Amino acid sequence: MTVIVLFGGPSDERHVSVASAQAIVRALPDVLAWFWAPHGAVHDVDVADLLAHQRPFEIDYVPSRPASWPALEQALDTLPVDDPIFLLALHGTAGEDGVVQRMLEQRGIPFTGSGSEASAAAFDKARAKEIVGGKVRVAESRVARDRKELAEVGREMLTRHEKIVLKPVAGGSSRGLFFVERDGDLPDVLPVPYIAEQFVSGRELTVGVVDMGDGPFALPVIEIEVEPGREFDYLGKYLGQGTREICPAKISDAMRETAQASALAAHLALGCRGYSRTDLIAVADDEIYFLELNTLPGLTAASLVPQQLREAGISFEEFLRRQLELASRSIPSGSAR
């Protein structure tokens, strides 16, 4: 099969996507690379050109070759290769929310990661919490569809909680994330639906779940330590400002087992395939709260899942090739469910 790494997309997480694609093509030099530009066109890019791009988290990638197709749908309908399989290096809206997955399912084209239904469910943070609730512990949260409603919801929740977290219902990489204390002002948020969530104070943990061919299992736990006055935002995640990632986490066996069990339970409840990463807050060994699950977590050199894979003794190349094998066994039927 011909492997095509699809990266970029219209979301504000395309910088992370470019860095993920760079890591993938370094590990798998025998692949094609397609860049889905923010305006919708698709470029068949030269791998050397992609690898030469510097500071991908900060600077937009502009391919040297002109676009090959005006839209992703047209590219998929006129595929120039036999037996294609897509290795998805997409993050954020339209790439991780089930839209691209549904396009591929409708055409019977295999791809890595979760299917469209699981992707859409996990990407909607409120819906994901509803699905995993009862299987893992979740904090109180409410959804607001606009800024006015968010202000009302936020004030109401702050009567019961000292601090709340505001984050877009759909999104990742800590874009548009705000922490608001009881005596603080509500921020000027993005013009999108938000979820207001009870802030739970504890240890920030994250756990990858992977399937290497014999069923999903949890990877070693990472703990995120944040410097006083800082948050685990985009700068902390990808530019190393104000955060430290400890792999494996220096936690008790009981906390580790609870965190891993929670991540695996969330992965299964949402119907994920291949791999995922779940973010958690640990208050005590047996009191761990689910925050969110990412169906296409970052695969950059600075990302969390690759660190966990290394700690588990799994090479990045082996992980990618196993994901491709899994995808090839799950070729879509040709119509969306």
Image (cartoon, helix red, strand yellow):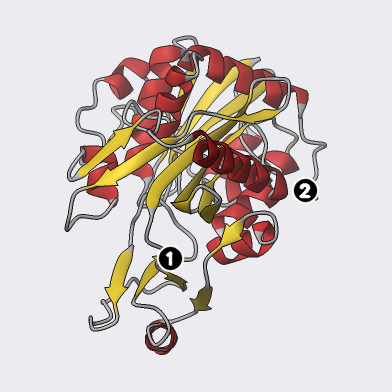
Relative image position of residue 128 (x, y in whole percent): 61, 59
**Residue 188 in the image: above or below residue 310:** below
- What mark, if any, has residue 22 been given in the picture? none
**Residue 327 picture quarter:** top right
Residue indicated by mark 1: 168
For mark 2, give the secondary structure.
loop
Q: Residue placed at 33% from the left, 25% from the top?
A: 301
User: Separation of disc 1 and disc 2 at Cα?
Assistant: 27 Å
Measuring 67% from the left and 41% from the top, which residue is drawn there?
Answer: 272
Toward the top, the furthest residue is 30
* Residue 34: image location, x then y, percent: 46, 29
Q: Report x, y in % for residue 110.
A: 69, 29
Q: Residue at x 38, y 48 (%)?
A: 204
Foreground mark, 1 or 2, reads: 1
Q: Name the residue beneath numbered marker 2.
A: 336
Residue type for callout 2 = Ala
> Mark 1: which amino acid?
Pro
Is any part of residue 69 visible from this angle? no
Q: Residues within 10 Å of mark 2 (few under 14, many from 20)?
A: some
Label 1 or label 2, whichever comes before in sequence order? 1
Image vertical order of residue 43 relative to residue 267, above or below: above
4 vs 188, nearest the viewer: 188
Q: Secondary structure at mark 1?
A: strand
Say above or below: 37 vs 174: above
Q: Nearer the viewer, residue 10 or 43?
A: 10
Q: Is residue 184 above or below residue 259?
A: below
Residue 45 lies in what quarter of the image? Answer: top left
Q: Is residue 53 visible?
A: yes
Return the x and y of residue 248 as percentages of the image width and height: 40, 28
